[in-house]
Image (cartoon, coloured by chain):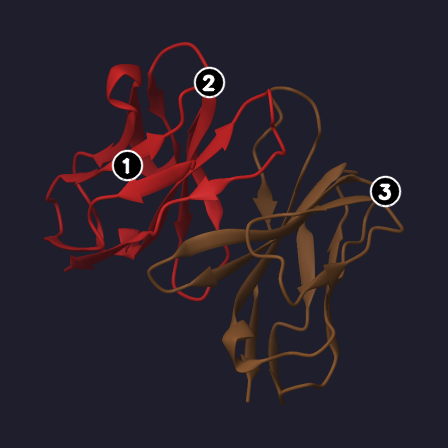
Chain colours: A red, B brown
Amino acid sequence: AQSVSQHNHHVILSEAASLELGCNYSYGGTVNLFWYVQYPGQHLQLLLKYFSGDPLVKGIKGFEAEFIKSKFSFNLRKPSVQWSDTAEYFCAVNPRPPGNTGKLIFGQGTTLQVKP
Amino acid sequence: EAQVTQNPRYLITVTGKKLTVTCSQNMNHEYMSWYRQDPGLGLRQIYYSMNVEVTDKGDVPEGYKVSRKEKRNFPLILESPSPNQTSLYFCASRPQGVGQETQYFGPGTRLLVL
């Protein structure tokens, strides 16, 4: 079955620390990859996405992610976090055709707490 | 402003009392979907719709119904809610074409079933 696994469920960092959140998926075919962020009390917002091309993608607010096809991974990184990055982060995968129902398969989420 | 709206945002109800959560998008998107978010489980798809009058089950459809009579609206119906349907619900939409797979999410509806 298709699944997405986020390794860290709860991460606590101090401001200016570097961040890396792991994401692995299980699907043998071609995928679209996403990272969404959910700030407290808000809806999901797209941070960045990968469809094809350069496997290192840059998103909003200084975030970036690298797609490593051989490892089925799409890890999220940020060199220096801020208190305002406190949020829940979701990795999601959209398997491409055949059998593409448009569904996003989400990981369990990682709660990031940044201490000022 | 391009957006997905949901109503109500918060709802407390009792077991067995039918309810509907509305979802509307103003972006002329063909594809719409409902997810539920539970702690430690991420978001799971309940139902989706590829276009008007075309709906199909997602991963957790039991206890839910949907309809897609108009392109902009995709209501989620709980005919007989139960406490295990207490959750945070998100509606999402996106265009149908290849390369258009980014989904846009509504603000969420927090449901408590007593």
On screen, residue A30 versus residue B92, left or right, reads left
Q: CA distance from mark 1 to mark 2?
A: 16 Å
Amino acid marked by disc 3:
Val
Of the 4 image quadrants, the one containing the C terminus of chain B is bottom right
Please say if B15 is above or below B38: below
Where residue B94 appears, as percent x and y from the top left, is 66, 37
Q: Which residue is mark 2?
A: A30
* Left or right position of B98 against B67: left
Q: Residue under label 3, please give it.
A: B52
> Pointer 2 indicates a residue of which chain?
A
Residues at marks 3 and 1 touching, judged by CB atoms closer than 8 Å: no
Give the chain of mark 1. Answer: A
Local packing at callout 2 (Cα closer than 10 Å; few below 14, some 14-19, many 20+) is some
Q: Which quadrant would residue A93 be assigned to in this image? A: top left
Left or right: where A16 falls relative to A42: left
The residue drawn where x is 43% and y is 34% is: A34
What residue is drawn where x is 20% and y is 45%?
A: A81
Q: CA distance from mark 3 to mark 2?
A: 28 Å
Q: CA distance from mark 3 to mark 1?
A: 34 Å
Name the residue that disc number 1 marks.
A23
- Residue A55: mark: none
Element on which disc 1 rests: strand
